[in-house]
Amino acid sequence: MKLLRLAPENTKFDFMRLRRLSYPLSAILSIVAVLLFFFVGMNFGIDFSGGTQVELRAKSGNADIAALRSTGESLGLGAVEVQRSGADTDAVMRVGIQPGGEAAQQTAVGKLRQAFGDNYEFRKVDAVGPRVSGELVQKGTLGIVVSILAVLTYLWFRFEWQFAIGAIIGTMHDLLLTVGFFCVTQLEFNTTSIAAILTIVGYSLNETVVVLDRIREVMRKYKRLSTAEIVNMSINAVLPRTIMTATTVFLALLALFFLGGHVIRSFSAAMIWGIFVATYSSIFICSPILIYLGVRADVFDRESAPEAQNLPASKAKG
């Protein structure tokens, strides 16, 4: 039986010809993403903006998450998050911080008790103030920064410096465009979104390492080809693998987006965007950097020459 192929064999696409378009496009999108972040901002969830968290337990039967969410949103309390907590009878509801201080927060809790008090037991009511949410923003940002620095450090030691610079630029490009995606769509940015960003960074790193490894392998094998020819040959060689990986991940995320529920919708939407951005950057952002940095196949000869000079005469001949 003939195997299914998502990409034709022995492709010879001239990807590097498009670098004169991809770089200006990515530069413009990155600048727009930064401007949107500062002037429009992201739609921070209750985890970051503050609000009230209520733990509910159904007096009979299971907690109806969809009904809780729809009823909560109809109360005019702004953003409402509902998710199951532990047993099927338990749920957690979060409402955004209300303008008007503590009195407004208590009024919001009163509306919740009036709407759900007949069918649900209010086990616990907690207020998440701006100070607590501010600390959460700081810790979340610190976690992202530390993770990215660890990834970039790995890239720096994993590849020659020219390759590492390309990988670093590609990773930062993906991060900026993902932040811009949240600003444009105004999807709720919460702790789940932080997990999405870190996952996108990992996926981008994986794509980058695969492409750069193949470029380095081909560059050592074909000494007389130009850098553009080597990069094109390498990308075409890994293209079936890239398409297969992106397609399978996309289908899984598509199922999560439509069937996973409201809680992980922002995560799955960001990941769908992330796999396209990471695939794009590994081909059109990271790889062409080697051409602009003047990398040639003889770079490996120059690196191995000092090592050969330091070997004993007998080993050097052998």
Image (spheres, grey):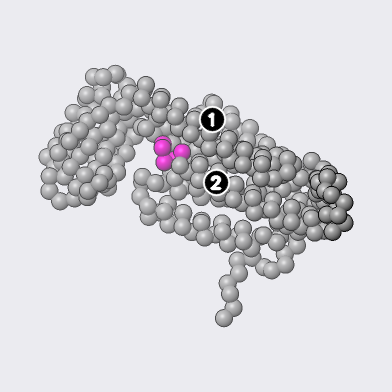
Residue 134 in the figure: left or right of residue 168 = left
- Mark found first going from the N terminus, 1 or 2: 1
Any part of residue 81 in sight: yes
Location of the N terminus (image quadrant): bottom right
Camera sees residue 70: no
Relative vertical location of residue 295 with respect to residue 179 in this rendering, above or below:
below
Name the spot of residue 136 as percent of width and height, x first: 40, 29
Nearest to the observer: residue 284 or residue 39: 284
Label 1 Cα crowd, 10 Å radius (few <14 / some 14-19 / many 20+): some
- Quadrant position of the C terminus in the picture: bottom right
What type is the residue that disc 2 sits on?
A: Gly
* 242 sits left or right of 188 in the view: right
Q: CA distance from mark 1 to mark 2?
A: 22 Å
Most common secondary structure along the magenta stretch: helix
Q: Nearer the viewer, residue 138 or 186?
A: 138
Instruction: Left or right? Give the position of 169 relative to 125.
Output: right
Which residue, given by chain and number where applicable, does mark 2 sit on? 202
Q: Residues within 10 Å of mark 2 (few under 14, many from 20)?
A: some
Q: Position of residue 19 (x, y in %)?
A: 74, 46
On whether residue 183 falls in the magenta region, the answer is no
SS of the residue under disc 1: helix
Q: The magenta stretch spans which residues? A: 190-194
* Residue 311 percent coordinates (x, y): 82, 48
Q: Is residue 6 above or below residue 90?
A: below
Compared across the picture, whether 193 is left or right of 231 comes to: left
Kindly report which numbered mark, 1 or 2, lies closer to the viewer in this rendering. Answer: 2
Disc number for residue 37: 1
Residue at 44%, 45% (x, y): give it: 267
Instruction: Look at 66% across and 41% down and name the residue there.
Output: 157
